[in-house]
Image (tube, rainbow, N blue to C red):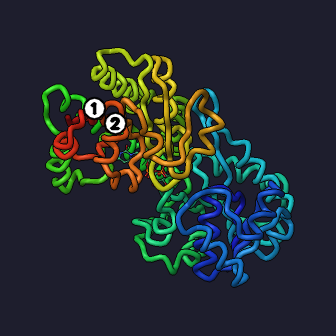
Amino acid sequence: MKLTVIGTGYVGLVTSAIFSHLGHQVIGLDIDEKKIKSLKQGKIPIFEPGLEEFIFKSLRRKKLQFTTDYSQALKGVDVVFICVGTPSKKDGSYDSKFVYASAESIAENLQNYAVIAIKSTVPPSTTNAVKKIIQQKTSVKFDIASCPEFLREGSALDDALNPPRIIIGTETKKAENILIKLHQKIKAPLVATTPQSAQMTKYASNAFLATKISFINSIAILCDKINADIKDVTKGLGLDPRIGQSFLNAGLGYGGSCFPKDTWALISFAKKLGYDFNFLKQVDQVNQDQVEYFISQIKSLYSNSLKGKILTILGLAFKPNTDDIREARSIPLIKQLQKLGAVIHVYDPVAMSHAKKILKNVKFFDSEYTALEKSNGLVLVTEWNQFKKLDLKKVKKLMNQPVILDGRNLFSPQKVKSLGFKYIGIGRQ
Ligand code: UGA
């Protein structure tokens, strides 16, 4: 089938990569000429394991092309995926301007019947707005649809090729059949529904996962107060199959481009519908308060004064295997620690170039060991695999004070204490 993917950001590139890999003819379109020029050479602007190789192979097999030209991209197309960005506005609602702009360009250049499916995460109701925009500008027949994505950064290719489910939201049987055929080679349970339900499924999924994280972080605070171990509690809790083990890792809370933005957007969407989604507001509040909580724990180890203390932040990305620092917990944490007088050293395997644009008066190092020299505390913020394998004996010798402040519960408290470190985790001491 012939597929056009509008937007070459994270979702657009992964979508282009997997459908071309599965044998479809894919055109990736973006209005950013510089980006398209480097994509044509197989250069990927984001860090995602395996993505560059997938794109490169598809380009070589001529299954994938990139262009800025809508008219060329839409010639003979069967399915158009809208994968443009949906940034947050100040009030938390999502900004539809890129989705609507792409709808206008599609309408101006559509030459034959196609299914136009929104993949960007948008509130239910957006499909109607997009449909109207296109109908006003063209007499060419089309069907509108919603195909939300459930990719996680860092494991996006595997998530896309082996998803737990495929959600297809359409208004006609014809569009449904086309989208089912497009996904034929992906083996997963498929839910065929309306666009509204498809989009609600996406919001509900992210809001529910965010809820799990804030819930377990609240339980972790209680564990700290009674000297219980959150890891053991989570293990026992998750063995109930109705609850499950996943997304119950207590820590500094969630970041990234999805959970924070999508919870705010759902709260704002609910408000427009006359419903006060108070519950989800609390989920967001718990997440924001988690950084403050960790700082209060840190302060307690230094007799409440961080003035002049060198704290080494290991990990800036919002999670491992990505260079993405959007809404990363590292940013508010570092800014707060600086306000309290701490001197900040940082190291992250891939996210430092992005962070340099945001963080001021921070010393960046080219390895975790150099960053830890003369440090008064190791502050673990992102649980990169390489940090798990740190040579702690060497670390202890490098540091001025052997203290580990574990914002992701990566280390074993018993092990690090036996090596002579002072240790604080989240919900475990
Ligand atoms: C999330 C969802 O997991 C995807 O299903 C969805 O498609 C995507 O948003 C999206 O809407 O596009 P992502 O933001 O890439 O994916 O990352 P996650 O792996 O879900 O992690 C989000 C945040 O939660 C990270 O900061 C992570 O550290 C934190 N987290 C996750 C926890 O604090 N505890 C956990 O147990 C799990």
Could you say whether the residue bearing mark 1 is in a helix, strand or loop? helix
Q: Are marks 1 and 2 in contact (CB under 8 Å)?
A: yes
- In the picture of the structure, the residue carrying the numbered disc 2 is 214
The location of residue 330, given as percent across then percent down, is 48, 36
Residue 174 sits above or below residue 95 on the image? below
Q: Residues within 10 Å of mark 1 (few under 14, many from 20)?
A: some
The location of residue 197, given as percent across then percent down, is 49, 53
For the N terminus, the image quarter is bottom right
Residue 149 sits above or below residue 96 on the image? below
Could you say whether the residue bearing mark 2 is in a helix, strand or loop? helix
Q: Amino acid at mark 1?
A: Ser
Residue 77: name its quadrant. Answer: bottom right
Q: Residues within 10 Å of mark 2 (few under 14, many from 20)?
A: many
Which residue is at 43% across, 16% downward?
307
Which residue is at 41% across, 40% downward?
381
Residue 364 sits above or below residue 152 on the image? above
Which residue is at 82% across, 52% downward?
136
Q: Is residue 126 left or right of residue 270?
A: right
Q: Is residue 106 left or right of residue 344?
A: right
| Rendered image: mark on residue 316 | none
- In the picture of the structure, the residue carrying the numbered disc 1 is 218
Q: Amino acid at mark 2?
A: Ser
Residue 296: name its quadrant. Answer: top left
Q: Cβ of disc 2 within 8 Å of ligand 1?
A: no
Which residue is at 38% across, 48% downward?
383
Q: Is residue 125 left or right of residue 315?
A: right
Structural distance between the alpha carbons of marks 1 and 2: 6 Å
- Camera-side residue of 184 and 329: 329
The location of residue 403, given as percent across then percent down, is 30, 33
The location of residue 65, given as percent across then percent down, is 75, 73
Q: How many marks?
A: 2
